[in-house]
């Protein structure tokens, strides 16, 4: 008789079915008789236009329920309910608000299984993921944020809630994205109108019921369901104070444009094409397991999916082999089966999108490999897919596929790895694998991404900010920086509006004959240069006396200045101490030249203001020299064997349209926080007194400011702003001016989704340290990068 060894048995064992019982979730759905209205003012409300759409189970194609299609009037009713609820919600004590958040966390935990099953049948994700990742993180988010209300007064003095917040979320992590949005909004005492994605509305509706169960005051949370048009109605609603969006970059761009003409605060969490970088000294088996999480979690429908595998050339063959073996062992099948690794794709349109992009990849010549494995004949499934021989510029290397598709490329050196990693318009996340802490941390610091996981992937925690660089959007979710998105300085909201046209002031644009008194030049890359246009514009005193001329800068000059700023990028890695030293030296030299500068400036702003500007400018230089080595990141200790180092990184190249009214102090108040944070700047000086550029560059030249760190282009602010907004290599635009100019800056910056900070047309009193300097400015001059570092064996 032939004996079967234990090892043979082990090899031939297969999984039995381990289905999750959906009975309780289905019973809950039955209570609603398969039809859901909106949740407005704490009550279920039929859609005004009586329209419904179906939500389906992507693993079977079967209809689950009818969902209300939100119209403009539904959105309006929800916004009104949120507005009406605001005073009562804000009059509660912080402790009372904390208790509501705590109660919501508890309620999520109490109903965690029902929520997991609902998520799985609506989205198609494996129950293992919804049960073990999504829903526990939802609870953690509410617990974490339950801690904030009572700390706000001390941690954010002088800040207040934005008001009514409109939130639009995608379908890939439906309840988790809801938690990421609603928890901080409520913790900061806002009220909310949230629109879930049309493919996955069920858990948001289940959450609405939890809000009632914990007795949340009606109107504090409102849920309006519907498609993109419902989202659009929320975005353009005039009584919404802030929009928070997660979804595609394309829609993010549309929202940036649609909100430009308003005072709405905006945060965008958009797409990604995140690199997964494996060095030859990495633990390859761990890296392969990391990839399974990195690209096959949630069928690859993850904004921060590690969709580009960058392998050091020497290990390309072994890692590819290991990867293929692991891929062949993945189980694609019913999401409700607890042994399933890869569930169903959310909707047919998404499946077709994946198929089309993969076909394009094949057509472009990349090699496509899929394991020969069974997949269910019914439902929307896609096999795990690996592309090799991928050209870095090909579609599969550049476009977000949002499916279980990995594109592998090779590199030789760490520098090449960084170059490849950054060869994308996105900048959401990255994973770096190496047993050398030096290599791992150096590469992590150089990759442009909001989150970097060292020897790990897809780790999330409510205490650690999450969000992108570049076209992956701006703003953070989670942590202190996430709270900031839902708060605003009270003084800023009350600041009076500038008169329209004030920013342009008197016409500085008269093109004139040769210089009479003083002629200054542009200042680019540390050199005084003539303008491309060959024209100058006059600068006159209050009484109309010609004081001198400044160059009429144009597109070409801005381009040169951007190039110079890019070349000076190493400024961001100059130590904080060195940056502070430069500022102190600047203060010294400014003070020495003070008398002559004041005498000239006085002709435009009067003697008193000129002296005050000088005195406060020297002070401000000291202020920011002080901040240089004190505006620091933090170390989070998430509930894993990790630390997450949250570093404040420079945004890169900054365009600055300076205020007209305080030519010297306004200039420094805007430029210094950017410079001290490590950015390089192209500043357009005050239109009222652009001659200040001449005084400033003489001071810069004698103060060791490295060439290219501060560039100055004089000219017509509105025109130069357009060029800066349009320029893809400008990472942030700070624009001070009237409402029209600010709106244009936001609208025109939608192209590469650069971060825009404006004064919203409000007058900022730069003469007051509280308004003109400090953390608020630095917060806008940096972006947080969270580097997750594991420890232990
Ligand atoms: P989408 O960006 O269209 O949808 C996300 C949310 O925005 C949904 O709630 C939708 O109803 C809403 N929306 C759509 N148009 C809107 C508008 N004009 N104004 C306001 N809200 C609007 O994403 P979609 O079409 O579902 O997926 C397309 C691609 O987007 C995916 O293949 C993927 O590449 C990317 N995506 C990225 C996500 C991320 O987390 N970064 C999430 C979802 C999609």
Image (cartoon, grey):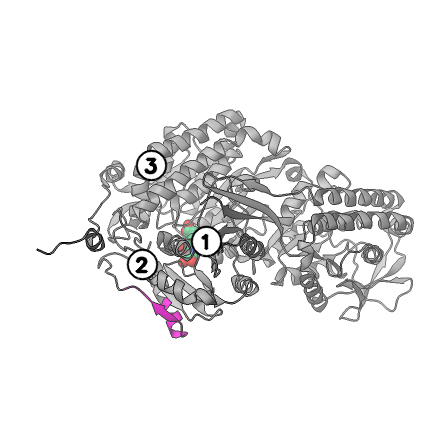
Q: Is residue 577 visible?
A: yes
Horizontal and vertical percent for residue 676?
Answer: 71, 49
Give whichever of discs 2 and 1 has the lower sequence position. Answer: 1
In the image: residue 730, left or right of residue 353:
right
Q: Position of residue 499 (x, y in %)?
A: 71, 47
How many other residues sit within 10 Å of disc 1, few (<14), some (14-19) or many (≥20)? many
On residue 348, the disc is 2
Q: Nearer the viewer, mark 2 or mark 3?
A: 3
Q: Which residue is mark 3?
A: 112
Q: Which residue is found at the position 27% from the left and 46% from the top?
A: 338
Mark 2 → mark 3, Cα distance in angstroms: 28 Å
Task: Please report contact status of discs 2 and 1: CB closer than 8 Å, yes or no.
Answer: no
Rendering quadrant holding ligand 1: bottom left
Horizontal and vertical percent position of residue 440: 53, 54
In magenta stretch: residue 369: yes
Of 555 and 453, nearer the camera is: 453
Q: x, y percentage for residue 20?
A: 24, 43
In this rendering, does residue 204 appear at all? no
Considering the numbered disc 1 on the image, is that residue within a helix, a strand or a loop? loop
**CB at disc 2 and ligand 1 closer than 8 Å:** no
Vertical position of residue 152 compared to residue 548: above or below: above
Structural crowding at the residue carrying mark 2, measured as other residues with C-alpha within 10 Å and reported as few (<14), some (14–19) or many (≥20): some
- Residue toward you, 206 or 19: 19
Residue 600 magenta-highlighted: no
Placement of the N terminus among the 4 image quadrants: bottom left
Q: Sequence-wise, which precedes: disc 2 or disc 3?
A: 3
- What residue is rendered at 38% in x and 43% in y? 134
The magenta region covers 358-371
Residue wearing tag 1: 304
Q: Nearer the viewer, residue 169 or 650?
A: 650
Image point 55% across, 54% down: which residue? 444
The Cα–Cα distance between marks 3 and 1, rounded to whole angstroms, is 25 Å
């Amino acid at each position: 008789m032939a004996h079967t060894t234990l090892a043979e048995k082990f090899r031939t064992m297969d999984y039995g079915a381990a289905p999750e019982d959906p009975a309780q979730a289905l019973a809950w759905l039955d209570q609603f008789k398969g039809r859901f209205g909106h949740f407005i003012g704490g009550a279920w409300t039929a859609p005004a236009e009586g329209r419904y759409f179906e939500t389906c189970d992507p693993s079977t194609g079967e209809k689950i329920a009818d969902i209300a299609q939100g119209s403009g009037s539904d959105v309006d009713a929800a916004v009104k309910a949120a507005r009406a609820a605001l005073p009562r919600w804000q009059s509660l004590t912080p402790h009372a608000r904390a208790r509501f958040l705590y109660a919501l966390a508890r309620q999520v935990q109490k109903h965690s299984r029902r929520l997991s099953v609902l998520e799985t049948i609506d989205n198609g994700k494996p129950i293992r993921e919804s049960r073990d990742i999504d829903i526990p993180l939802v609870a953690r988010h509410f617990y974490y944020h339950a801690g904030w209300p009572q700390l706000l007064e001390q941690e954010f003095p002088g800040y207040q809630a934005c008001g009514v917040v409109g939130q639009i979320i995608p379908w890939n992590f439906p309840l988790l994205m809801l938690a990421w949005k609603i928890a901080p909004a409520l913790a900061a005492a806002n009220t909310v109108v949230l629109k879930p994605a049309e493919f996955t509305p069920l858990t948001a509706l289940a959450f609405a019921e939890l809000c009632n169960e914990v007795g949340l005051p009606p109107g504090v949370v409102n849920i309006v369901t519907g498609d993109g048009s419902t989202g659009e109605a929320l975005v353009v609603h005039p009584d919404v104070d802030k929009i928070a969006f997660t979804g595609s970059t394309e829609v993010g761009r549309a929202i940036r444009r649609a909100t430009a003409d308003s005072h709405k605060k905006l945060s965008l969490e958009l797409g990604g094409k995140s690199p997964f970088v494996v060095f030859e000294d990495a633990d390859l088996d761990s890296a392969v397991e990391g990839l399974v999480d990195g690209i096959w979690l949630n069928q690859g429908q993850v904004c921060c999916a590690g969709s580009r595998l960058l392998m050091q050339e020497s290990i390309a063959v072994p890692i590819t082999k290991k990867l293929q073996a692991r891929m062949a062992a993945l189980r694609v099948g019913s999401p409700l089966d607890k042994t399933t690794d890869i569930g169903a794709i959310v909707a047919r349109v998404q499946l077709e999108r994946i198929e089309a992009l993969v076909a394009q990849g094949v057509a472009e010549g990349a090699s496509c490999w899929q394991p020969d494995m069974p997949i269910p004949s019914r439902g929307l499934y896609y096999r795990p897919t690996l592309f090799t021989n991928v050209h870095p510029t090909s579609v599969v290397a550049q476009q977000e596929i949002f499916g279980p598709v990995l594109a592998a490329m090779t590199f030789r050196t760490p520098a090449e790895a960084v170059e490849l990693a950054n060869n994308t318009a996105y900048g959401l996340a990255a994973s770096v694998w190496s047993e050398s802490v030096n290599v791992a941390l150096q590469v992590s610091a150089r990759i442009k991404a909001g989150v970097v996981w060292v020897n790990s992937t897809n780790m999330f925690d409510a205490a650690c900010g999450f969000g992108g660089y570049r076209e992956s959007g701006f703003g953070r979710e989670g942590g202190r920086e996430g709270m900031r998105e839902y708060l605003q300085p009270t003084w800023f909201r009350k600041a009076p509006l500038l008169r329209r046209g004030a920013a342009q002031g008197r016409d500085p644009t008269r093109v004139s004959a040769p210089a009479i008194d003083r002629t200054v030049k542009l200042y680019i890359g540390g050199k005084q240069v003539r303008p491309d246009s060959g024209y100058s514009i006059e600068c006159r005193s209050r009484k109309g006396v010609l004081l001198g001329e400044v160059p009429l800068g144009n597109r070409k000059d801005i381009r040169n200045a951007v190039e110079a700023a890019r070349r000076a990028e190493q400024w961001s890695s100059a130590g904080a101490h060195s940056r502070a030293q430069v500022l102190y030296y600047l203060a010294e030299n400014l003070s020495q030249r003070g008398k002559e500068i004041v005498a000239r400036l006085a002709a435009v702003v009067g003697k008193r203001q000129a002296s005050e500007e000088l005195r406060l400018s020297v002070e401000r230089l000291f202020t920011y020299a002080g901040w240089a080595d004190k505006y620091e990141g933090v170390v989070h200790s998430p509930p894993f064997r990790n630390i997450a180092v949250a570093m404040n990184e420079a945004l890169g190249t900054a365009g600055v349209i300076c205020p007209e009214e305080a030519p010297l102090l306004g200039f420094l108040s805007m430029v210094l926080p950017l410079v001290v944070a490590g950015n390089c700047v192209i500043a357009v000086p005050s239109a009222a007194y652009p001659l200040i550029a001449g005084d400033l560059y003489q001071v810069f030249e004698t103060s060791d400011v490295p060439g290219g760190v501060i560039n100055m282009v004089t000219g017509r602010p509105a025109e130069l702003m357009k060029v800066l907004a349009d320029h893809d290599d400008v990472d942030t635009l700070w624009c001070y001016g009237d409402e029209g100019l600010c709106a244009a800056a936001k609208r025109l910056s939608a192209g590469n989704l650069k971060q825009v900070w404006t004064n919203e047309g409000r007058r900022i009193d730069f003469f007051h340290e509280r308004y003109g300097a400090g953390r608020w400015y630095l917060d806008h001059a940096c972006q947080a990068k969270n580097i997750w570092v594991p420890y232990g064996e």
